[in-house]
Each structure stands twice: as C-alpha cells, then as structure tokens.
Amino acid sequence: MSENSDGAAIALSGVSKVYETGDDRTFRALDGVELSIRRGEFVSIIGPSGCGKTTILKIVAGILGWNDGDVQVLGRSVTGPGPERATVFQSFALLPWLSVLDNVAFGLKLRGMARDERHRRARRLLESVNLADFAAAYPRMLSGGMQQRVGLARALAVEPQVLLMDEPFSAIDAQTRLLLQTDLLDIWSRTDLSVLFITHAMDEAVFLSDRVLIMGARPGRVIDEIAIDLPRPRTEETRRDPRFVELTGYVWDRLRGMISKDGGEVAA
Amino acid sequence: MIAGRRVRTGIRNAGPFLVSVGVLAIAWETVGRTADILTIPPLSSVLAAFLDMWVRGIITAPLLDSTLALLTGLAISLFVGTLVGVGIGLSRLVELSIGPFVKAGLSAPMIAFVPVFMMLFGIGSTTRIATVVAFSIFIVATNAATAVRAADPRQLEMARSFGADRWQLFWQVRLPAGASYFLAGTRFGVSRGIKGLINGEVLIAVIGLGGLVKQYGTVFSMDQLYAVIILIILYAAIGVGLVTLIGRVVLRRSLEEVN
Amino acid sequence: MKVSFRTGGSRRAAGSSRHWSELRSARWGVRLATLAVFLGAWQWAGDDSLALLFPTFTRTLETFIGLVADGSLPLALLITNQTLVAGFGMAVIIGVTIGVLSARVPIVDRVVSPYFNLLVAVPIIALVPVVQALMGLSFQARMTIVALFALPYIVINSAVAVRRVDPALVEMARSYGAGRLAVLREVVLPASVPGIMTGIRIGLGQALIGMVVAELTIVGAGVGSLIVEMQGRFRVAPVLAVAITVVLQGVILITLAEWLERRLSRWRS
C-alpha cells in the first residue's frame, strides 16, 4: 500500500472492472481508477452517464466485485459489505411493507440488535431528520424527499464511519433537493463521517464537497480533480457566492467536452 | 452468426431439462422392465402401443373428432364471448348487469355443470361442445372487455385533437392498443377450451380422446392409457403453441399496418 | 377552435360530471334487476313435467332445500371439502417451495420449470386414471388429484413473484450485510407475498375443478357420488342443485381469496 493512503477512509488504486455482456463480449466499465478520500472528507464524483461512477460506489460498498487493483476502506481491503460503511440509494430502496420506523431500524435488525433497542435508536434518528411524526407511516405515504430522509436515517442508524451516497437526490424535485443538501451538510458537520457522493448535478457536487472528482467514460476513469475552497458552514448564501458560480462553471467546462461528443472520447 | 449463437445458448439453457427428460425416460424403462408392476409398463411398450394405435387409426379418428368439437366450441366462445366482452367494455349498464356473472364464471368450477349437460344434451358431442364453451367463454369475454378499454386516454385525446372520427379512433388507436389483449384472450380461450374438451370427454366416457382415457383406464390397459395421455399432452402443448405463434404473427402484421 | 372545444368537451364528460353508475343505489338496482331477469328467464325456460327435463328455478330451489334438510348435501360437502383442504394445502406448501427454489437456484429452474409450463397447458384430468391405478379409490388419490390441478399455477406464479423482486432492494439488504438467507427472509419472501397470493388464488380455482373431477371420476365420495347417484335416477333437479351449490361455494372461496390477496398486497398500491 502506498503510504499516503494508509490513513485514508477510501482508497482505490488501479481498479478495473470488466462486465461480461453475453455472447463472449465484454465491456470495460472502469480502467485503472485511482482515488483516495481522507477521513472526514466529503468527496463527490461527477461524470457523464455510463462513466462507471455508480460502479465505483458499489465496489466500495462491497456489493460488486472488480477485476484488477486494490480497494481499501479505513486501511482494510474490501472483501464484502462491512459495518463501517452504509449506503444511501438513488431509488431510496425502502421496503414498502415495513413502517418508516422499521425501515430505519432495518440495518440494525440485520446486525441482530433487539427490537426495543433498535426501535429506540431508529426513533432518535427519525428526530434528527425531522420525521419523528411519521414513524408509523408507510413509505408510499411519504414524498420523495421524505423517503430519502428515511434512507439517510437508515444509513446513519448503523453508525457508519463511511457514508456512500449514490445519486441520492436525483429523483427528488429541485426545490426539495436544495433543502436536503443543506440538511445533509448540517448532519455531516456534527459527525466525523467520510462521504463518497455520486451525482450528475454540478451545483450539488460543488455545494456539498471538499473535492470534486470528474470522471470520463469508456472506459471510466478519473480525469480531473477540483478542490472546492468555499468556506464552511455552507448556507443558501454560498449558492450566490461568485466563487461558487466560478467553480460550477469550471466543472461544466470539463464535462461539456465529453457530453457534446455523446460521452465518447475525451482528450484527457 | 447471431442466430447460430442464439441456437447454441438455447441448447445450453435447455440442456439440463433435456438431460432430466432422458434420465426420467431411462428410469421409466428400467422400472417398467425390472419391477414388473402392472401400472408402470416400460416406456418402449408405451411407444409401441402409440405407434400401433396411430397406424390402425384407433387414435387418429378420435383425434379428428375431438378437434372438430373443439373448434365448434371455440367458435361459439370467440363469437359470443367477444360480443359480451365488447358490450361490457363499452357500456356501464352491461358491465354492471352481466359483469358479475362473467367474473364468477371465470374462476368458478364450471365442470360441476357437466353432469347437468349430460342429462340435458345426452352423451354425445353437444355436451363436450357445451363444456368447451363453459371453460373458454368467460376468459374470452374478460379479455375482450379489457381490450376495448386498453387504449391510452392521452392517445385518444391526441387523436381527437387532430380531428379523428369514431372509426379512425377505432382503427388507429383502439384496435392496435387492444389487439394484444384480444389475442391473449384467444390464447387462454384455446388453452381452457382444450381442457374443457378433455374434461368433458372423460366424464362423458364414450367419445373422443378423453373417452379413450376413461376406457383404457377402467380396464387397466396401461400401455394404451399412457399412449393416449402422451397424445393429449402433445395435443394440448401443440394447440396452445400454435395459437401463440399465430397470435405473434398477426400482432406483428397488424402493428406494421398501422405504422 | 373547433378542435380545442371538442377536446374540452370530452374531458368534461369523462371527468367532472357524475355518471348515474357512480351511485351505489343505482348499481345495486341494476344488479338486482339482472338477477330477477335471470331467475325469471330460468323459471320460464324450465319444465317440471318430467324429471329428465330442465327444471324451473323454484323446483331446483325446493330440491336444494330438500337435500339440505335430509342432511345428504351437507354431509357430501363436508367430505368434499376435506379433500379440497388436504389437496390444496399440500399444493400450496409444495408449490410455493418449488416456485421459490426455481426462482433462486438456476439449475432447479432449468430442470423443473419446463415441466410445470407444460403441466399448465395439459388437462390434468387425463392423469386421473394413472393416479387411480397407483393409489386406488382412496382419499389420498382424490387429494393428489386436487393438488395436481393447483400445483403448476402456484409454482409458476411463485417463481414469477420471486423473480420480480426489485433488485435494488436486494442490493440494499446486501449492502447492510445480509447474507443469502437473510436476503430471502427479510426482502425476497415479503416482497413476493402478493404474487404468491395471486398464484394461490388461481390455484384455488383449479383445485376446485380438481375436487369435482376427483369425485366424479374416482367414485365413492362427497358431492361427486351424490351427483352420480341422482344422475343414475335420471333426476335433473338435484344434479343441478348440487352443481350450483358447488359453483357458488367456489365463487365464495375465490372471493375470499381475492380479498386476502388484496389485503396482503396493500403496501403495493
């Protein structure tokens, strides 16, 4: 292991992923991906669709294998899912037959925590995402934004050190999304969570992150890295900061070249 | 190339099934030869009986006879069932009055009426035709009703906004949207009709393929019994497969014509 | 102008104005009127002068009451339903197990599924003589026939239900550390309940057919023997009364199954 990644929350070196597409053909989704996230850092990955950003997240989450390279979380090699990681999903992935409370407690149940104790902890987390009144409700009764708060509470309930977020706000309307972004930063600032955040929204990446990684497609790899030097805590004022506009513009410039070529070749 | 590859993956997927068929056939033959149980004759003697009966016309005549009755029953079901279904689909009054009967007939054990049919219509072809109708008409009506309502209201509205009249709406929007449901109804109707046919014939006991089952079963002529059962299984599988195939061709053609 | 007017008009007709059929009383009125017309037609078409002719509604009703009063119909139904409960219960347990297995284990799917896809198309009644030859004129034989009728539908629908489980939910559970068994218990099975219930409801309809088939062909029990006996005496009214009882019982059971299916699927809407 290289020395600078020893203390890293997440470290990928030379990671490649090849999908079998049937008929003996293959598709190289990731090619030699290098990335490292420090403890307590908030890092976003942005890129055109099909660049493999969600593939990276699934590999780190331990639910998808890879072909070459090394993946480490908190200095240990990834061999599967682990209690120090929790994931928030694009589709929310709530269990529709369980109440909101039981959904939040789901990860704890899988870890064998007793019913009363996991419900107590789930209730506390529902309060922290302002959904205490909806503990007995079912997911279908909730708006998309509220459902994703449940998804976030479920992830936080298992007290992870690394939070993996897979385009968590992309299925949520624009206004609610802005509110969720500030809420997320608020919760994150009170913890020492390291966050890997996948998104396709440039303003979201810039607003949330300490660093933004830009990926290119076919094969997917990290082609640029932008440090976001906006001061924290970030508020609605941040969105009007000229530096915010400038950084967002820079990200767009880097992405535009790839998208206008239909996600094809990129001069890296 | 692609076709060849598809055939190869098809064989690979069907492989375990074909192996299991082979194993079962060998097991059947072995048990039949060695165990000497009356009820399990060797597969080879069943196949021999099948060939013998086929050549001598013992099963071909009932096969034709049964098929004729099946087609008659299906024709009645398709005609009346479609009329009723279209009525249900178009009119709330018809739906409220006849709908509950159709819904009940769809899943109720209509076979209980076969003894009544036998007493009223005698032990001839009329009874099995009535059974075919009783088994198949409700599914045809149900799918016809769904087919009539299948059109997307947004597409209808769009077509109206371009000034389409009733006939154009029917041909351009309703028919293509409903065709797949109607064909599904026909397919289920045929599948259920075949079951009705054999059920009716077994209970009537003296006509058609089902009658042969009853006759050989009663006297424990196991070779012949298994031969007829195999024929019925093939008959049902081929009948349903044929309608599925025809349905696909018709559907593709009707979609092409509209586009 | 003309076009937009027509669009607006159609929307109004479809949406805001209340159609007569939305009134509860109107709906019940139509239903009762239809039933009255149906029974009236039956009464008119019937002819009670000979026992071998199609009986009137009132005659059939009288016969039904007579069969209930002398205890023969209730006793027959009791015996018949024992067969149904045992055979259908067996089909549910075995069918759901095979269905779930075939959806989760590819080799089971490849070996087993073609047989059940074939069995769905096959008239199971053709297998009755084989069951009879192997098991005799026994309760077990009748139970097996009921189970054979229901089994393919339960297997296929259970397998479809398990295959349709949202893979995102399975992925979620795995990311929280669920193993194969926990994924099955916490996600796959609860998510499949509505689809499995659909299979059970359709299977029940088939089991009811199997129940009648078993008793009409393997003589010696329940409503089947009652029908055969009355048939032998050339009396249509009791045969019709028993047949209608069996059909109505079927309609009631299936309505109950539908209700249960809806209740267990509520989270899906």
Image (cartoon, coloured by chain):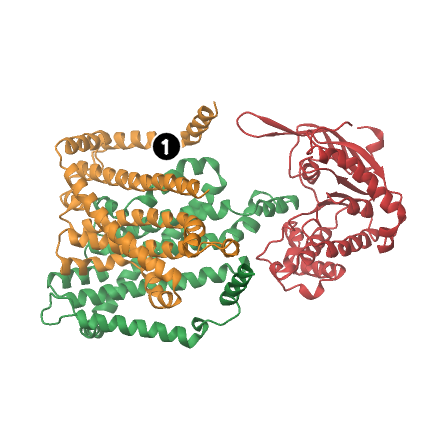
Query: Looking at the picture, how far across and down is residue C189, in whole percent?
Result: 52, 50
Residue C242 seen by the camera: yes
Can you say which quadrant of the picture contains the C terminus of chain C?
Answer: bottom right
Where residue C203 sits: x, y (%)?
37, 53
Task: Decide if residue A75 is in sight here.
Answer: no
Regarding mark 1 in the picture, which secondary structure is present there? helix
Q: Pinpoint the chain carrying mark 1.
A: B
Q: How many marks?
A: 1
- For image coordinates 23% across by 38% down, the residue present is B231
Q: Residues within 10 Å of mark 1 (few under 14, many from 20)?
A: some
Chain letter for the orange part = B
Horizontal side, residue B138 vs residue A130: left or right: left
Q: Is residue A47 above or below residue C96?
A: above
Q: Colour of chain C?
A: green
* Left or right placement of residue B176 versus residue C168 in this view: left
Q: Quadrant of residue C247?
A: bottom left
Percent of width and height locating residue C97: 44, 47
Residue drawn where x is 45% and y is 45% of the image: C159
Tell me the residue that label 1 is attached to: B20
Between residue A6 and residue A154, name the one nearer to us: A154
User: Which quadrant of the figure has residue A47?
Assistant: top right
Q: Residue furthest front?
A: C1
Q: Nearer the viewer, residue C125 or B87?
A: B87
Outermost residue on the left side: it is C50
Q: Where does the N terminus of chain C fall, quadrant-wise? A: bottom right
Residue nearest the viewer, comparing A46 with B45:
A46
Is A97 placed above or below C151 here?
below
Residue C113 locus on image (x, y percent): 40, 40
Q: Amino acid at mark 1?
A: Ser
Q: Is residue B221 above or below residue C92?
A: above
**Chain coloured red:** A
Relative placement, left or right, of B122 versus C261 is: left
